[in-house]
Image: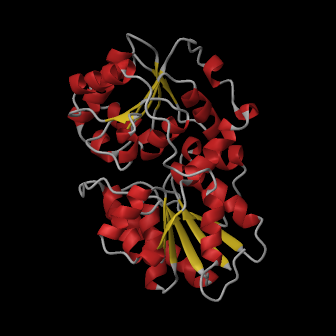
C-alpha cells in the first residue's frame, strides 16, 4: 500500500510522528511525505524534523503566506502533481489547515481515497477558516479517524456513513506519551528561562480571529500582561503575531511585560507546558497538550472544538475576548479545583488503530 501524506504546519508535524514511524515499520506499506511549506520558518518547521526524528519530506514546496484562496490554490496545484506522479492507494491528511484541504481536494478529484486524521471536530463557527477546512475535508474523506466520541456524534449528525468513521483516539496523545513515559525526554528550558518553581503561565497566540482584529489582539496581550504581575507569562511568539503586533503601540507595550521567546521545538514546549501552572492559548492542539499534562487552560476564543475538556473542568472560555473577561476566566481557572480525571482521547494507541483500519480496506489483509 502506498500512502501520500500531506503536512504543512507545526501541529501536523507533531501528529505525523506517531503514525509515520508506525508506517515505516509496517511491511508492504510505503509513505511519500509532502510538506507544503505552509509553516516555513525554521522554528515552526525544520526544528521538528531535527528534534523528533520525523523523516525528511520526499517533496517540499514553499507555499505559505498570502490570502487563504491564493495559498490553498497553489497548494492544490502542487499536491495534484505529486498525486499524479506517485499514484498512491490513499492520501492522508491531518487536522484543519489549508494544507489539509488542498490535499483532500486534490486526492478526491483524482479519485484517490482520502484518510482524515482528527475528523469530526466542530467549533460550529463558519467564520473560522479552520472550520471550513474541517467540514469540507470530512465530506470528501473515505476514512474519517475521529479522536473522541463527540467527534463521531458530529459526523453522524451530518449524515456521514458510519462505516467510514473510526473512533481511534488522538494521535497527539501517542506523542505526548513520549514525555509522560520518559523523563529523559525533558529539557532544561525552564532553567534557561530562569522560571520559578512556584508557578508560571505558558501562552500561544496565532489564530486569525485574534491576530487580524487589533482590538482582540490588544485585549489578549494586555490580559497576559496583567497576569504577568502575578507570575511570569512565557509567550513563544508566532512570526505572524510578532509582525502584526509591531504596528500596534499598545500591543508592543504589553509584550514588553512578558517573557517573549521564539517558537519552540516539541520537547522544549512539552517540558515547558508540563511544569506550568496555567496555559492560555488559541491553539487547538495546545488545549489538549495542556490536558495531557493536567494543566488548567483558558482558551482565547469564543468557542472550542474540544468541548469535552470544558465539560471535564480542565478548560474554560472567557465570556468575551476582552481584557477583563479574560482576567476573570484566568482567576476562575487558578481558583478552581483540578478537573475530572478522565481519558476521552483514548489510550495512546491511535496510530496503530489508524494503520489497521487503512490496511483493512477491501482487498487488503489486516496487519
Q: Quadrant of the C terminus?
A: bottom right
Asked where in the image residue 16 lies, by quadrant, the reply is: bottom right
In this rendered view, identify the residue nearer to me: 149 or 53: 149
Where residue 115 appears, as percent x and y from the top left, is 52, 72
Where 361 sits versus 12, above or below?
A: below
Which residue is found at the position 54% from the left and 38% from the top? 292
In this rendered view, identify the residue nearer to me: 219 or 282: 282
In this rendered view, identify the residue nearer to me: 9 or 67: 9
Asked where in the image residue 249 lies, by quadrant, the reply is: top left
User: How is this picture coloured?
Assistant: secondary structure
- Residue 282 visible in rendering: no
Where residue 112 appears, as percent x and y from the top left, is 52, 83
Where residue 325 appears, as percent x and y from the top left, is 22, 26
Which residue is found at the position 32% from the left and 19% from the top? 331
Which residue is found at the position 66% from the left and 37% from the top? 179
- Residue 62 visible in rendering: yes
Q: Quadrant of the N terminus?
A: bottom right
Image side of residue 154 versus residue 173, left or right: left
Where residue 31 appears, as percent x and y from the top left, is 68, 70
Which residue is found at the position 36% from the left and 24% from the top? 333
- Tally of numbered tags: 0
Image side of residue 248 versus residue 101, left or right: left
Amino acid at each position: 500500500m502506498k500512502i501520500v501524506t500531506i503536512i504543512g504546519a507545526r501541529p501536523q508535524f507533531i501528529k505525523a510522528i506517531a503514525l509515520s514511524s508506525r508506517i515505516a515499520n509496517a511491511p508492504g506499506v510505503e509513505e511519500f511525505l509532502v510538506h507544503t511549506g505552509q509553516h516555513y520558518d525554521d522554528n515552526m518547521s525544520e526544528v521538528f524534523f531535527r528534534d523528533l526524528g520525523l523523516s525528511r519530506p520526499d517533496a517540499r514546496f514553499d507555499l505559505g503566506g498570502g490570502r487563504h484562496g491564493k495559498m490553498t490554490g497553489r497548494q492544490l496545484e502542487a499536491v495534484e502533481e505529486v498525486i499524479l506522479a506517485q499514484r498512491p492507494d490513499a492520501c492522508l491528511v491531518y487536522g484543519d489547515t489549508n494544507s489539509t484541504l488542498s490535499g483532500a481536494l486534490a486526492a478526491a478529484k483524482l479519485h484517490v481515497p482520502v484518510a482524515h486524521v482528527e475528523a469530526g471536530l466542530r467549533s460550529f463557527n463558519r467564520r473560522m477558516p479552520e472550520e471550513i477546512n474541517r467540514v469540507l475535508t470530512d465530506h470528501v474523506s473515505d476514512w474519517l479517524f475521529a479522536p473522541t466520541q463527540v467527534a463521531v456524534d458530529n459526523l453522524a449528525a451530518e449524515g456521514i456513513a458510519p462505516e467510514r468513521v473510526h473512533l481511534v483516539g488522538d494521535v497527539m496523545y501517542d506523542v505526548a506519551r513520549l514525555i509522560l513515559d520518559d523523563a529523559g525526554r525533558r529539557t532544561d528550558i525552564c532553567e534557561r528561562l530562569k522560571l520559578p518553581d512556584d508557578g508560571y503561565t505558558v501562552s500561544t497566540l496565532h489564530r486569525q480571529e485574534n491576530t487580524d482584529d487589533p482590538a482582540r489582539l490588544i485585549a489578549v496581550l494586555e490580559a497576559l500582561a496583567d497576569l504577568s504581575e502575578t507570575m511570569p507569562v512565557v509567550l513563544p511568539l508566532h512570526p505572524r503575531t510578532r509582525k502584526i503586533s509591531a504596528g500596534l503601540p499598545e500591543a508592543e507595550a504589553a509584550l514588553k511585560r512578558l517573557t517573549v521567546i521564539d517558537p519552540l521545538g516539541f520537547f522544549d514546549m512539552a517540558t515547558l507546558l508540563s511544569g506550568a501552572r496555567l496555559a492560555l492559548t488559541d491553539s487547538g492542539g495546545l488545549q489538549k497538550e495542556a490536558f495531557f499534562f493536567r494543566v488548567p487552560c483558558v482558551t482565547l476564543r469564543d468557542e472550542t472544538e474540544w468541548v469535552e475538556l470544558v465539560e471535564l473542568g480542565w478548560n474554560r472560555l472567557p465570556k468575551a475576548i476582552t481584557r477583563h473577561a479574560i482576567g476573570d476566566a484566568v482567576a476562575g481557572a487558578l481558583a478552581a479545583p483540578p478537573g475530572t480525571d478522565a481519558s476521552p482521547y483514548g489510550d495512546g494507541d491511535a496510530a496503530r488503530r489508524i494503520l489497521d483500519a487503512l490496511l483493512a480496506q477491501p482487498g487488503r489483509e489486516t496487519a
